[in-house]
Image (cartoon, rainbow, N blue to C red):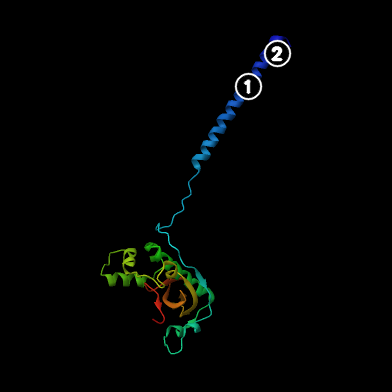
Amino acid sequence: MNRQALKLTVALVAALLAAALLVACGSGGDSASSSASSASPETVASQSGVEVETGPLKVVGGGSASYRIPGHYISVPAYAEEASKAELRAAATVEHGYLVAQVEKDWVKACSYISEGLRHRLRFDSKKADEDCAALLATATKPGPGGSDYESSEVEAGSLRSTGIWAYLLYRAATAPYFMPMVMENDGWKVNQVAPMPFYG
């Protein structure tokens, strides 16, 4: 191969290498741009935007006997039959979710835990049949047991006295005993009263 042919071959190889490098750089730029545009920011925020310290849910079981105090008669601990631990947990989870939503002032979420019967009673009592559940519940709700957000949303569940459709959830908050009427709707427990009732008070 003469000197001129060798120069042409080297020039051709150099040109091919340069073209390959340009294609590679261009491809890499498109890939990075595509990756950046497909990324989405993570959003973490509560539904209501209100920061509160909520109480825990504990399912301790043990039945209704510990809610009976000598010299004080109340029929709730003797109502119907003692439900299973699984049913107690299911009802207590609903009650706890409801109370947490209340202290967070997330009334739409709170409404998701209440029964259809309670929705109708809220409308009837307020004489505002067209007003939505969230607005009615916000108006009807009073401060919960214990006097703080933590205590108001604390549930230490001990017993569920149930017929299978109607029930009372017996629990403690701030060491004091409370009960909440519950009803089975669409294969799940729903809260059937705006606020829990103290046993003795």
Q: At label 1, which amino acid type do we have?
A: Leu
Give whichever of discs 2 and 1 has the lower sequence position: 2
In terms of image quadrants, where is residue 125? Answer: bottom left
Asked whether, in this view, residue 145 is left or right of residue 82, the answer is left
In terms of image quadrants, where is residue 51? Answer: bottom left
Residue found farthest to the right? 1
Residue found farthest to the bottom? 71
The label on residue 6 is 2
- The residue lying at 57 percent from left, 33 percent from top is 28
Considering only vertical position in the picture, is 3 above or below 94? Answer: above
Name the spot of residue 199 as percent of width and height, x first.
Answer: 41, 81
Asked whether, in this view, residue 191 is left or right of residue 131, the answer is right
Asked whether, in this view, residue 85 is left or right of residue 76, the answer is right
Name the spot of residue 152 as percent of width and height, x first.
Answer: 42, 70
Name the spot of residue 26 as percent of width and height, x first.
Answer: 55, 29
Considering only vertical position in the picture, is 105 above or below 4? Answer: below
Q: Which secondary structure, mark 1? A: helix
Q: Which secondary structure, mark 2? A: helix
- The residue lying at 42 percent from left, 71 percent from top is 190
- The residue lying at 50 percent from left, 42 percent from top is 38
